[in-house]
Amino acid sequence: MKKTIVILMLTILAVACGRPSGSRGGRTLIQNKGSDTLVNVAQAWAESYKEVDPSVAIAVSGGGSGTGISALINGTVDIANASRKLKHDEFEMAAKGGAEPVEFLVGFDALAVYLHHDNPAEALAIPQLAGIYGEGGEIETWSQLGLQVPGCPSDEIVRVSRQNNSGTYVYFKEAVLGKMRDYKLGSRDMHGSKDVVDLVDKTPCAIGYSGLAYATEHVKLACIASEEGGDCVNPSTDTAVDGTYPIARPLFMYTHGEPQGAIKAYLDWILSDAGQCIIKHKGYAPVRPVDCG
């Protein structure tokens, strides 16, 4: 009998240790991981939530949407941040693990196309971007676009991209290149969103794509048209929400099944006016109109 009780207690302990959420110093700990696009606002949410509920601590890390989704499937995080929707095979893998991911729309982002400050380009069309980045695309130099870029004597277009575990990488591929077309080889693939903008800032020949919230005064944001010769739209929180910007995207958080307790309370707060004003102040668009004063 005693042996049975001991085995039962060890089993319960093992299950509990395998769960991502837990406690630290008497506080409930929520593990939150994923999208590099969302990591800054996720950290801001975590910091602000300390004042809402001091008994809850949120540990935030990036690594890319794919990294967060994999951790969610494996049951090692409570919330995965993603700048793309889960794929069908990811839902299937999660189901095999015994849970169905639940999706929460937490904001919108205008995926900006970044140029060096001295680049004379004002507008670019989606087909031109596909010609620059897409496999088989023939645009390799700025002069092919009728441009002469100061500080770029080689005339080469230096393509700055993201690594393939990034939701930004996946979304740009689908929205700009098309689902059946891959990236051409030879791009400089950066680990983080900020890294893309920093490299474009330092490289006159460069072009890159990243979240609008990473814009600085040292780089230029291209006005984007859906087709060559069409009217272009500048990236902004307003054009992301109303859908007029051609490469605006939703931002998500996923949980391993329906959230309960502290995790549910945290997500409810993120979707409240207080949480949505934080995402707005960070340069993203909230899921609905909010008065932030």
Image: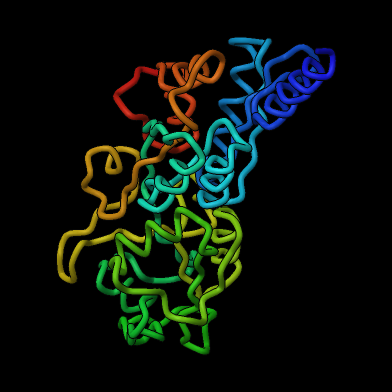
In the image: residue 110, left or right of residue 35:
left
**Image quadrant occupied by the C terminus:** top left
Q: Nearer the viewer, residue 42 or 157?
A: 42
Q: Is residue 158 above or below residue 258?
A: below
Q: Residue at x 69, y 22 (%)?
A: 22
Residue 215 location (% of width, % of height):
49, 50
In the image: residue 17, left or right of residue 154:
right
Quarter of the figure with residue 236: top left
Q: Nearer the viewer, residue 76 or 36?
A: 76
Residue 250 location (% of width, % of height):
35, 42
Quarter of the figure with residue 258: top left
**Image quadrant occupied by the N terminus:** top right
Q: Residue at x 36, y 76 (%)?
A: 134
**Residue 205 seen by the camera:** no
Q: Nearer the viewer, residue 133 or 223?
A: 133
Residue 175 location (% of width, % of height):
30, 60
Residue with the most extreme right position: 2
Q: Say how the picture is coloured.
A: rainbow
Residue 18 location (% of width, % of height):
68, 32
Residue with the most extreme left position: 230
Q: Is residue 268 above or below residue 204?
A: above
**Residue 96 seen by the camera:** yes
Quarter of the figure with residue 40: top right
Q: Residue at x 30, y 43 (%)?
A: 240
